[in-house]
Amino acid sequence: MLNKYARAFFTRVLTPFAALLIRLGISPDAVTLTGTAGVCAGALVFYPQGEFFWGTVVITLFVFSDLVDGNMARQLGRSSRWGAFLDSTLDRVADGAIFGGLALWYAGSGNDNVLCAVTIFCLASGQVVSYTKARGESIGLPVNVNGLVERAERLVISLVACGFSGLHKFGVPHIDILLPIALWIVAVGSAVTLVQRVVTVRREAAEADAEEQAVPQGGETR
């Protein structure tokens, strides 16, 4: 849902900014690399210290680079396999930094081994969810499924909860409970999404194998 509607909205909003960067001679790859570096810095500097509000502000400023670089490439007519590969790869790096920063907090000053484990599960399951789709497509399957919690949902749920939880340091009582709730939601949702994709790939693989076996070697079906 977020990929379909929110991405289209922000793409329209950010188009003038993307055009400005092009006029300044900045490449889409440079935007991708800068955005990932900013997200990683915000997550790994602020989150382990429990500075969830300011960390989320920094991450949010840079996370929109994921939309800007693609917009720039389309305006330049330079959409390429390399750009898609770089973007997808660095997305995984950014996700790892976000959940890694939270895990460091819970393993250290946050002092909560259960939530540390949940956060690590969010990190690992998110990577595997992305891998299942990429691997399925690499063997010629469409992987035609809309998962319950995909990357956009994982980021929005986690970052919104993280940002609001950070208001606890500004005197807002009990709001820090939002982050643990969000992490459990993302963990369960990611597990469900993983099962959805595995089941879909299994079904599509079986259908593809059946179609191949139905065609006699050296001839056509009669």
Image (tube, rainbow, N blue to C red):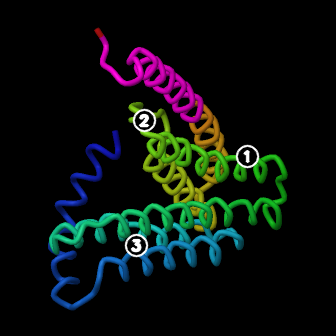
Determine crowd level at label 1: few under 14, some 14-19, many 20+ residues with C-alpha closer than 10 A.
Answer: many
- Residue type highlighted by circle 3: Leu
Name which of mark 3 and mark 1 comes first in the sequence: 3
Q: Which mark is residue 118?
A: 1
Q: Toward the viewer: 69 or 215?
A: 215
Q: Which residue lies furthest to the front in this view?
A: 218
Start-end of magenta stretch: 193-221
Measured in 3D between alpha carbons, the distance from the residue under mark 3 to the one under mark 2, in whole angstroms, is: 35 Å
Q: In this view, does 4 lie above or below 222?
A: below
Q: Which residue lies furthest to the top in this view?
A: 222
Q: Which residue lies furthest to the bottom in this view?
A: 24
Q: Toward the viewer: 157 or 14?
A: 14
SS assignment at label 3: helix
Q: In this view, does 183 lie above or below 170?
A: above
- Residue type highlighted by circle 2: Leu
Measured in 3D between alpha carbons, the distance from the residue under mark 3 to the one under mark 1, in whole angstroms, is: 26 Å
The residue to which callout 2 is attached is 141
The residue to which callout 3 is attached is 61
The percent position of residue 167, horizontal first and vertical second, equals: 56, 62
Q: In this view, does 21 lie above or below 94?
A: below
Q: Residue at x 57, y 66 (%)?
A: 93
Q: Residue at x 41, y 14 (%)?
A: 214
Tell whether label 1 touches label 3 (CB within 8 Å): no
- Whether residue 164 sits left or right of residue 116 in the image: it is left
- Residue type highlighted by circle 1: Val
